[in-house]
């Protein structure tokens, strides 16, 4: 199927976290916490997407892109709240993530938030952030494709958490072109797009490593510190994305001719959404 | 520890200042496709098909795609493509006479008339290797007709009130061994009785049929609605049309759009299901917007109307 024809709409999902164990991939605290990282980073991160895209909306001069952006905003807003639920569940299990979340919040709201600047510069600041979001969305789509195929069930992962990750991953794949198209529509300078990736890739890696380390250190079950060896072993079993695969994906983003539609994955995403318990319950 | 990122943000700010030079204005993108009606046929009682062309190749589409059709009166409605995706020169849609817009198609659109569309777009893509089971109710046949052709082992259950109300039965003649026609109001069990375990069901038809099929099939279900699902247990609220404007109560069994159309019959809308954005309005004195067709509020929401 030719991908760009898909209409994007949010799905009003709900998850019941009450029965999800602390180590929801049994015997794999590192895998659990690397993925729990998403619950600490995404609520604030995706609210920031919503905020920045809202500021971009009045500048769009393409009716179809405007519809895509509105669909994107709706989906990201639901993602943020869904991961917030999972973060609250972490808190209910005796791990208070608030100090870490406060830092993430400072990053997105203050450091990357609205700045008092002359109008022309303020617009460029908006474009800088749109380029960053396009780069970040490249990774969310890569991770989305990965999680749709990862052998999480056979590792005994909790089905509710797997559904959260796969529903989210599927929507990331569905809307993977929107941030890129929006950046290309409003600016499109290649140098800025590449520069944003050069920043976003390492910063995301650093952010996730920090967050996973923080979770391991604050886990009341004291699983010990995160070790690279454990991460490699988990990646070999397919339970974490592998670093070489992420580096290859980063590289793919750089050529001027790149477009996210070439990466595919929509079929798997649509097929998953037709079976996802949360997406099915949300369909009206 | 996040203070480490301060210089990174400072660099972006520096590039923002520098980026002012070299900024180009955003070019407007025109998505309108001006087409001409090149054929018009009566396909069943109250169903007319239109074949549209522009003289050059049209944007490609897959089974399940629809067009956003602008009628001469200004009304916008979606219609599923029901022709052959391999034919790049024409689009075909089929319209059942239901209300205002579809009545205009029936009464005033003629061969040779211009008609503007946007799209194609899809919220109903056909995926996977199957087995696929297609369930059509009445005019819901339109997106499923090209799906059946695209899925070599696919099977269609086509339901309708009566044979003379069901379009395209003649076109299905050569696929007779892959089609079951049911008239009246068959139960979901009857509809799905020949579906193999593990099949992906694709359904399009009236809301009660969709609800029954979705509830009865535990495997993958893909579906499309032509009209919004009924609202049964919403909380009542109020919309106000501008500061100091009239206040319209919205009951628990209707949408804000339905309520608005009672006092402002000219209120624009299209899909009624929250995905086309036609009905979107600004909420007064905020940056928020409101979709009257699906969104609900608590208390009162003041709209920029
Ligand atoms: C994605 C999509 C694809 C569509 N494809 C087709 C198509 O291929 N052929 C087609 O004829 N229509 C199709 N429709 C429906 C079409 O867009 C219009 O809604 C329909 O023509 C009614 O518009 P109207 O102005 O005539 O009626 P309105 O005055 O807008 O509506 C009258 C009432 O009828 C209800 N209604 C709408 N459609 C139906 C229906 N099929 N049966 C019973 N009640 C209905 C509405 O909810 C409303 O309450 C599609 C809709 C969507 C969202
Ligand atoms: S009418 Fe389509 S979004 Fe409201
Ligand atoms: Fe997301
Ligand atoms: Fe996203």
Image (cartoon, coloured by chain):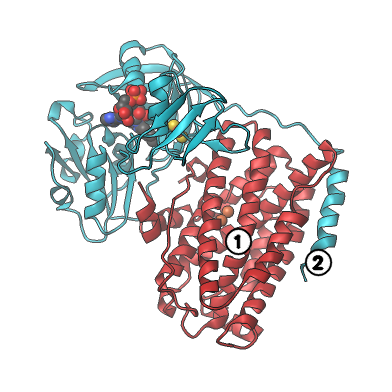
Q: Chain of mark 1?
A: A
Give yes or no for contact between labels 1 and 2 (Cβ–Cβ under 8 Å). no
Q: Who's the residue at 80% across and 47% down the image? A: A115
Ligand 4 lies in quarter = bottom right
Q: Is residue A79 visible?
A: yes
Q: Is residue B89 above or below residue B20?
A: above
Chain A's colour is red
Chain B's colour is cyan
Q: In the displayed structure, does residue B109 sit left or right of residue A131?
A: left
Residue at disc 1, CB closer than 8 Å to ligand 3:
yes
Q: Residues within 10 Å of mark 1 (few under 14, many from 20)?
A: many
SS category of the residue bearing label 1: helix
Q: Who's the residue at 58% across and 87% down the image? A: A223
Query: What quarter of the picture does the C terminus of chain B occupy?
Result: top right
> Rounded to the nearest whole Å, what is the CA distance between mark 1 and mark 2?
19 Å
Q: Is residue B135 visible?
A: no
Q: Which residue is mark 1?
A: A42
Q: Which mark is residue B3?
A: 2
Residue B283 location (% of width, % of height): 57, 33
Q: Is residue B215 above or below residue B114?
A: below
- Please name whichever residue, A59 or A41, is drawn nearer the observer in this view of the structure: A41
């Amino acid at each position: 199927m030719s991908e760009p024809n898909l209409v994007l709409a949010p799905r009003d999902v709900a998850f019941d976290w009450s029965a999800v164990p602390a180590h929801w991939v049994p015997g794999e605290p590192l895998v659990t916490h690397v993925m729990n990282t998403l619950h600490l980073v995404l609520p604030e991160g995706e609210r920031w997407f919503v905020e920045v895209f809202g500021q971009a909306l009045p500048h769009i001069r393409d009716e179809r892109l405007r519809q895509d952006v509105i669909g994107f905003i709706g989906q990201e807003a639901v993602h943020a709240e869904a991961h917030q639920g999972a973060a609250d569940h972490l808190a209910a299990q005796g791990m208070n993530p608030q100090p870490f979340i406060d830092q993430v919040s400072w990053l997105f709201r203050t450091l990357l938030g609205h700045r008092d600047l002359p109008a022309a510069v303020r617009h460029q600041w908006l474009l800088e952030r749109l380029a960053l979001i396009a780069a970040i969305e490249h990774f969310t789509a890569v991770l989305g494709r990965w999680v749709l195929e990862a052998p999480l069930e056979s590792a005994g992962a909790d089905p509710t958490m797997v559904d959260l990750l796969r529903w989210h991953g599927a929507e990331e794949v569905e809307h993977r072109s929107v941030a890129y198209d929006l950046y290309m529509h409003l600016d499109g300078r290649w140098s800025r797009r590449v520069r944003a990736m050069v920043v976003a890739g390492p910063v995301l890696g650093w952010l996730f490593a920090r967050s996973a380390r923080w979770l391991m250190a604050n886990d009341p079950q004291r699983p010990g510190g995160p070790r690279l060896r454990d991460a490699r072993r988990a990646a070999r079993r397919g339970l974490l994305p592998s670093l070489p695969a992420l580096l290859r994906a980063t590289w793919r983003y750089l050529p001027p001719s790149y477009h996210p539609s070439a990466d595919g994955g929509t079929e798997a995403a649509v097929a998953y959404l037709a079976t996802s318990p949360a997406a099915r319950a949300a369909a009206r | 520890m996040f203070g480490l990122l301060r210089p990174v943000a400072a660099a972006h700010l520096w590039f923002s200042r520098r980026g002012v030079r070299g900024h180009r204005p955003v070019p407007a993108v025109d998505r309108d496709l001006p087409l001409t009606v090149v054929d018009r046929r009566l396909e069943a009682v109250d169903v007319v098909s239109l074949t549209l062309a522009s003289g050059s190749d049209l944007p490609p589409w897959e089974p399940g795609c629809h067009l956003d059709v602008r009628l001469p009166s200004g009304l916008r409605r979606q219609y599923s493509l029901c022709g052959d995706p391999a034919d790049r020169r024409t689009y075909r849609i089929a319209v059942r006479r239901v209300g205002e817009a579809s009545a205009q198609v029936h009464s005033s659109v003629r061969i040779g008339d211009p008609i503007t569309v946007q799209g194609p777009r899809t919220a109903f893509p056909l995926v996977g290797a199957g087995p696929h089971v297609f369930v059509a109710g009445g005019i819901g046949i339109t997106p499923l007709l090209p799906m059946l052709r695209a899925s070599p082992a696919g099977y269609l259950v086509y339901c309708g009130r009566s044979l003379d109300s069901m379009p395209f039965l003649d076109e299905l003649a050569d696929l007779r061994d892959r089609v079951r026609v049911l008239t009246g109001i068959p139960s979901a069990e009857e509809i799905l009785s020949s579906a193999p375990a593990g099949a992906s069901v694709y359904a399009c038809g009236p809301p009660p049929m969709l609800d029954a099929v979705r509830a009865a099939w535990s495997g993958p279900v893909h579906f499309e609605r032509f009209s919004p699902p009924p609202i049964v247990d919403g909380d009542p609220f109020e919309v106000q049309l501008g500061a100091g404007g009239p206040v319209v109560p919205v009951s628990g069994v209707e949408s804000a759009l339905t309520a608005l159309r009672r006092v402002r019959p000219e209120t624009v809308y299209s899909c009624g299901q929250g995905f086309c954005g036609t009905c979107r309005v600004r909420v007064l004195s905020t940056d928020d917007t409101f979709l009257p067709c699906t969104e609900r509020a608590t208390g009162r929401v003041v709209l920029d109307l």
